Image (spheres, rainbow, N blue to C red):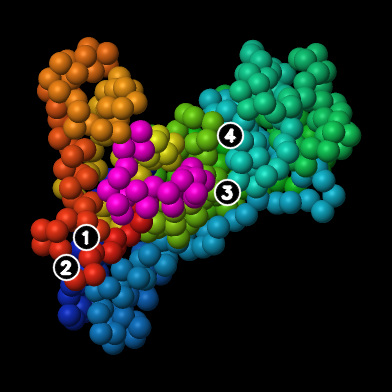
Amino acid sequence: MAFEGLADRLQNTIQKIRGKGKINESDVKEMMREVRLALLEADVNFKVVKEFVKKVSERAVGQEVLKSLTPGQQVIKVVKEELTELMGGEQSKIAVSNRPPTVIMMVGLQGAGKTTTTGKLANLLRKKYNRNPMLVAADIYRPAAIKQLETLGKQLSMPVFSLGDQVSPVEIAKQAIAKAKEDHNDYVLIDTAGRLHVDEALMDELKQIKELSKPDEIFLVVDAMTGQDAVNVAKSFNEQLGLTGVVLTKLDGDTRGGAALSIRAVTETPIKFVGLGEKLDALEAFHPERMASRILGMGDVLTLIEKAQANVDEEKAKEMQQKFRTASFTFDDFLEQLGQVRSMGPLDELLKMMPGANKIKGLNNLQVDEKQINHVEAIIKSMTKDEKIHPETINASRRKRIAKGSGTTVPEVNRLLKQFEDMKKMMKQMTGGSPKGKKKGGFKLPFNPF
């Protein structure tokens, strides 16, 4: 995930000041020197760093901090607030036209992932906002760009408007909007051409498309891994087209995160969405406050809850909670839960959204082995229906058969059966189902694990 280096440095720095009963100006100065270095190392624009450090320093040596009961925590609050402000303050929502369709122009250089991002955004609009988008293939220069968009349209079962590569992009945009009105598509996403660098011909064409289609949004798609180059590209496009938003791709890669912290400040253009992976659902709305929380190791519970709500069936969750309380759930239930959790995204990323996760040793380098999870699924699927309900019936010969059927080993099957049994015992104790050590009234679950 992006920001890891920056997050480590900032978290170590604020850890030193967190518990201090009293702090003075030299404490703040020392902390700000560390913060400044951390931001510069993360490839944040020099002017942005200078301004950020100045703002935090002024507030940190002011009355609100020095006179407070917990000055260390107050400084952290100031850093979080200013970091949030630096990335745009509040979430910038996507436009909705009073007279549909809402037109979005997707612009950017070649290689930033513009066409894929156009598909991802259409997918998000449909899934999260219940919209009916149309994709428009207006990149007539890059070989296979039209084909790529049509393939994405098929994968998403979504209409793609194309007139081939012999018609001008301006004409394509014009006819696409007319067709969208006819077909009652409420969003039109125009995938425009990119170049290897910003040039006059590209800008002229984009300006013509803008003039004709009168877009409600012009989104620049930039690769977060290009660092300061991404900021310069954003500046160029903004000066010539007047951007309404930026979509940062590859924010899950090995990137230092400087682009995300600099783009908003340099161009005054909000970051609207971030790409966090290859899959077509790996695009999220950008929330500055949540990102600031994650950078400072405070977790991101709201995003975690949203992911759960989007991927977990509520009725089944209630049913599962009941089974959890009575410790009566089976291997089939376990398999279903595993599938629902996996649909929320990579497990190591989900863990990092939990508050305090940064303090768990080795979590930053944690690689949840998907192969291991596949093995667990294969073992359960190799059991008979009766064995899944009554695992106690699985004797030595059955264990051999299950191992053979799942392509695993008998020790792996034994380990899973033991872990499952231990889990059920623990549930019985937690819910007062075990006579041993049972407290009056039994235990209540401190949280809903599903």
Where does label 2 land, which residue? 439
Expressed as whole percent of the image width and height from the top left, the position of residue 110 reads 57, 25
Near mark 3 (Cα within 10 A), the count class, few <14, some 14-19 or many ≥20, is many
Expressed as whole percent of the image width and height from the top left, the position of residue 277 reads 45, 33
Instruction: Give the secondary structure at mark 4.
Output: helix
The span shown in magenta is: 308-335
Do the CB atoms of the residues marked 1 and 2 lie less than 8 Å apart? Answer: yes
Do the CB atoms of the residues marked 4 and 1 lie less than 8 Å apart? Answer: no
Q: CA distance from mark 4 to mark 2?
A: 51 Å
Q: Which mark is residue 391?
A: none
Magenta stretch contains residue 312: yes
Report the front residue among 435 and 141.
Answer: 435
Q: CA distance from mark 1 to mark 3?
A: 48 Å
Where does label 1 land, which residue? 432
Where does label 3 land, which residue? 272
Do the CB atoms of the residues marked 4 and 2 lie less than 8 Å apart? Answer: no
Q: CA distance from mark 4 to mark 1?
A: 46 Å
Near mark 1 (Cα within 10 A), the count class, few <14, some 14-19 or many ≥20, is many
Q: Which mark is residue 120?
A: 4
| Sequence order check, earlier mark of 1 and 3 | 3
**Which image quarter: residue 192?**
top right
Please state which of the two labelled residues, at mark 1 or mark 3, is closer to the viewer.
Answer: 1
Q: CA distance from mark 2 to mark 3?
A: 51 Å
Instruction: Give the secondary structure at mark 2.
Output: loop
